[in-house]
Image: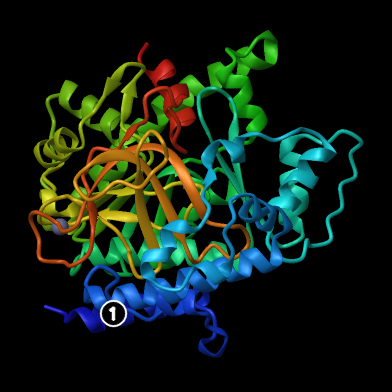
Amino acid sequence: MIGFDEYIDKFNKCVDKYIPPINTWTPADEALYKPKDLFRIPLKEAEQLQFKAVKFAFNQHYANNKFYQGFCKENNVSPDDIKASDDLVKIPLIPDGFFKDYPHGKEFATWLGNILTGDLPKIEIKQHIPTYDQVIDAFNKAGMLVSYSSGTGGRHTFIPRDQRTFFASEYAIAKSAVTMLYPFWEHDSSGYLLMPNPKKTNIYAGKVCLVYFDAIQNVNVAIDREITTELIQMMMSGGRGLKGRLIKLFSRRASRQMVDDIIKWLEYHDKTNEKITFVGAPYILYFVMEKLKAQGRSFDFGERCGVATGGGWKIHENVRLSVADFRKEVKDVLGIPEKYCLDVYGMVEGNGWMVQCPEGHYLHVPYSYYKPIVLDDEFEQVGYGESGRFAFLDSVASSYPGFITTGDRVKLLEHCPVCDRPGPVLEPEVKRVAGAEMRGCAEEMRSMMTRDIGR
Ligand SMILES: [Zn+2]
């Protein structure tokens, strides 16, 4: 079996373009790119890396982001207050709702510009009253990678990443998954991306998967049409008028076609010896398995197939699939061992990716560059083992302050109850805080598809 160091060196070669030149590394880069295994750094060492990285990021945003500096002043916190690891929790956290509270038209561009840390690129918007998509396109033409996620309530969460931050996020998700799947990953393999085509959407969960095309040789894409905020809005609002009806009709056919295409791909690979992977939204694979079960069929791919899921666990409106049930079904219907079926938890606002360990399926935190925090209802920090609202200090977000509270309810444990990796873990079932709307990058896609495919 290949040694871990050699394995990760091979991976790093495939994603070379994502890693900035060493002579430009900041303490945040050091904490992400240097450790070979982000989940096996001795605690003391990781804490030092984390402190340096987060403090560096806080100084940068305080100095170069007027909006965030004002927010810190209101909270009476400045870089001088952050002297040791224990002080990191004093860093003011931006509520996730802030990123959903945006104006439209040209003011939306100004709003996005205000979140940015550092210089605003030169943006050209030709339209008198631009749509959200047109504003995003203008930013992205200027070299940014603005992406979004949304709740079913119709409000999107927009995050302005620059190229460096985006590369860091892509590198982090791929490295984290490849690490946990050791020794499974191989570049010469085929994969199916269960997400919108990253080249045709600015939905973050799709976009961040661009790295999949560098990590392995052949990638098929489940959702290949262009997905815009306008299309999402039209489908979510019930699609009034002829245009809406046509889109719906198209979507129903496309959803069924998607499931059939994936089954054909499975049949093809049943006869090859290649390693294959599925990456993306679990509900798509769920519908594939439902169809196979209805036909009384199953496959036996064994250890040459891996599955990495992310983006929400709702299957039908009020039905939530449990992560463990899904894993069992993947084993029964596709013959893939549970140790190679791992869930990833992350979000559009952050660049930290919690990945399940193969032994116990707890979500391990990449704690050298990303500090997890759990808050009670009064937004005070609670200790390990208590449930509460998830928040994080993300040091690799350089184009916006990555110090954010979320609407997700989690339980953070000091150590994994099953495996021997050091560092904190989240319990696998992450839910929404009561009252917070459903969201997740895959949520609007799922909602469209289940409406179409259930009939
Ligand atoms: Zn574990």
| Viewer-proximal residue among 292 and 329 | 329
The residue lying at 51 percent from left, 29 percent from top is 151
User: Is ligand 1 less than 8 Å from the beta carbon at label 1?
Assistant: no
Looking at the image, residue 426 sits to the left or right of residue 401; the answer is left
Please state the horizontal and vertical placement of residue 113, each as a whole percent of the image: 75, 52
- Residue nearest the viewer, comparing 77 with 274: 77
Where is residue 257 shown, x and y percent of the image?
41, 29
The quadrant of the picture showing ligand 1 is: bottom left
Where does residue 389 sit, x and y in percent of width and height?
Answer: 36, 39
97 lies above or below 209: above
Q: Split into 4 quadrants, where in the image is the N terminus?
A: bottom left
Residue drawn at the location 37% of the way across and 11% of the way down: 455
275 vs 48, nearest the viewer: 48
Q: Is residue 237 left or right of residue 365?
A: right
SS under mark 1: helix
Q: Which residue in the rendered view is the most extreme toward the bottom?
A: 23
Query: Residue 424 lies in what quarter of the image?
Result: bottom left
Pick the residue in front: 134 or 37.
Answer: 37
Instruction: State whether residue 176 appears in this view.
Output: yes
Would you say 18 lies left or right of 12 here?
right
Identified at 11% across, 52% down, the residue is 360
Please indicate, yes or no, whether residue 32 appears anywhere in the rendered image. Answer: no
Indicate the quadrant where residue 265 lies: top left
Residue 274: x %, y % from top left: 23, 61
Mark 1: which amino acid? Answer: Glu
Quarter of the rendering containing residue 281: top left
Q: Quick one: label 1, few (<14), some, or many (20+) residues within 10 Å?
A: few
**Residue at the spot of label 1:** 45
Vertical order, 290 against 424 (above or below): above
